[in-house]
Image (cartoon, helix red, strand yellow):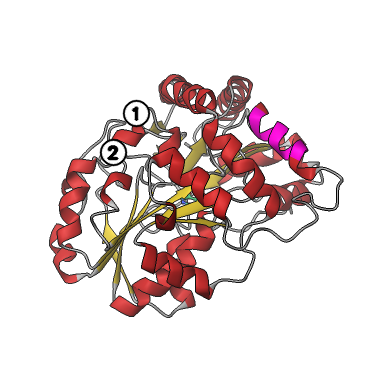
């Protein structure tokens, strides 16, 4: 019997899939992790080369600056913030752990579902209670939308002091409007907004809650740079929040949570505005293109998305099709069985580069024609 991959809780299990298939990871088209497929940018590659150096004081050799002074300044300068309001992290995921510790001290955390699994991991570290807040899975749009009508029970917000939001949402790609999120600040004792994918969204910054942080100590915004820069292996993200809160988090962590190479590269990535514009233009162009192409395939209903991934629903289980894509075409998709409220009729697909899009569509076309009725 053919080996079957386990149900994933995250995308990007490239090594595991390659080992299962007995191929090199580079032979796979990975659409399970939503990274920019044509990165990292030249600015990042160059900064990394310089940072490696060979001298005894290169960032590769010495301990990173524990105060992360230059890195904080670069991030703060990028957004026009006070450096004390910025805490760089080993990816956004590391920072969720500390946000969850604060959340645990305040009571129940509310989480729109289906949603990103790592918040639950972080909250479980501190035995924090979680209450799901089911989202309506009606067709949604790529444009900024108000959050409240999408929640099945907005009244639940009155009972929860802590709310975790993802903007744009993962896995739907729905962008919540700033105007609809700002009033939540009055209702929450802690509002954690994960803007991991916002830098990739065309005009996404207009919906960011970053400008509200200084006036709202109960707000924390967490950003990732691993998607924008295609540096998931290097790891980089940051939190923006009240300086006292971030100082407390810093005291909980290990002494060098951000490696020296990431610290050296991030300022170059942030300064590369051309790269951001290129990525956003690609999302604006390729997202609708992939959605329209998938729509033409029988039984598949791809949803509109503001981000560099989209959700696809089928009229029957996609599990067999998923396994055929992997085994016969070496294409890895994000199976949604681990998302509460979704299941085996759903996939999340990262936007591929044009060659990847052609490879995906040819593979789906072939499988759906050769095996009609067996799956979507
Ligand atoms: C919504 C969301 N936030 C955060 C992360 C983690 O980002 P990082 O790689 O910076 O830890 C992911 C990773 O997939 C994600 O989907």
Most prominent secondary structure in the magenta stretch? helix
Does the residue tagged 2 have its C-beta within 8 Å of any atom of ligand 1?
no
Seen from the viewer's position, the closer of residues 147 and 360 is: 147
**The N terminus - image quarter:** bottom right
Residue 272 percent coordinates (x, y): 55, 29
Residue at image point 50% right, 55% down: 92
Res. 242 image quadrant: bottom left
Residue 203's label in the rendered image is 1
Question: Which residue carries the number 2 mark?
Answer: 207
Magenta segment boundaries in residue numbering:
43-50
Residue at image point 48% right, 43% down: 347
- Can you see residue 262? yes
For marks 2 and 1, give the CA distance: 8 Å
Residue 330 percent coordinates (x, y): 70, 37
Residue 45 inside the magenta-drawn segment: yes
Q: Is residue 122 above or below residue 308?
A: below
Residue 10 percent coordinates (x, y): 55, 54
Number of other residues with Cα within 10 Å of mark 1, as a class: few under 14, some 14 to 19, many 20 or more: some
Whether residues under marks 2 and 1 lie with C-beta atoms below 8 angstroms apart, the answer is yes
Identify the secondary structure beneath mark 1: loop
Q: Is residue 276 left or right of residue 137?
A: right
Residue 312's label in the rendered image is none
Q: Is residue 249 left or right of residue 67?
A: left
Identify the secondary structure beneath mark 2: helix
Seen from the viewer's position, the closer of residues 210 and 69 is: 69
Q: Is residue 352 above or below residue 240?
A: above
Residue 21 inside the magenta-drawn segment: no
Q: Is residue 118 above or below residue 138?
A: below
């Amino acid at each position: 019997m053919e080996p079957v991959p386990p149900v994933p809780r995250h995308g990007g299990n490239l090594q595991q899939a390659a080992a299962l298939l007995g191929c090199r990871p580079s032979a796979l088209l990975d659409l399970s992790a939503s990274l920019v497929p044509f990165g990292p940018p030249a600015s990042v590659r160059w900064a990394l080369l310089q940072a490696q150096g060979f001298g005894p004081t290169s960032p590769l050799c010495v301990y990173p600056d524990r105060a992360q002074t230059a890195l904080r300044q670069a991030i703060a300068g990028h957004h026009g913030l006070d450096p004390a309001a910025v805490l760089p992290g080993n990816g956004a995921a590391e920072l969720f752990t500390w946000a969850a510790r604060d959340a645990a001290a305040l009571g129940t955390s509310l989480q729109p579902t289906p949603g990103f699994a790592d918040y639950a991991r972080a909250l479980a570290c501190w035995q924090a209670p979680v209450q799901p807040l089911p989202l309506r899975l009606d067709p949604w749009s790529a444009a900024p939308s108000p959050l409240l009508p999408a929640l099945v029970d907005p009244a639940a917000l009155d009972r929860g002091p802590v709310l975790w939001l993802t903007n744009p949402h993962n896995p739907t790609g729905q962008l919540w409007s700033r105007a609809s999120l700002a009033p939540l600040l009055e209702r929450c004792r802690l509002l954690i907004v994960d803007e991991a994918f916002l830098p990739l969204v065309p005009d996404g910054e207009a919906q960011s809650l970053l400008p509200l942080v200084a006036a709202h100590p109960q707000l924390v915004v967490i950003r990732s740079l691993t998607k924008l820069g295609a540096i998931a292996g290097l790891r980089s993200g940051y939190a923006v929040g009240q300086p006292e809160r971030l100082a407390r988090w810093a005291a909980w962590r290990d002494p060098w949570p951000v490696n020296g190479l990431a610290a050296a590269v991030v300022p170059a990535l942030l300064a590369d505005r051309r790269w951001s514009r290129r990525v956003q233009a690609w999302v604006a162009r390729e997202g609708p293109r992939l959605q329209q192409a998938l729509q033409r395939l029988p039984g598949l209903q791809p949803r509109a998305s503001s981000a560099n991934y989209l959700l696809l629903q089928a009229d029957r289980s996609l599990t067999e099709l998923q396994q055929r894509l992997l085994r016969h075409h070496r294409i890895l998709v994000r199976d949604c069985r681990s998302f509460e409220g979704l299941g085996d009729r759903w996939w999340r697909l990262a936007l591929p580069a044009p060659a990847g899009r052609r490879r995906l569509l040819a593979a789906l076309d072939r499988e759906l024609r050769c095996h009609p009725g067996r799956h979507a």
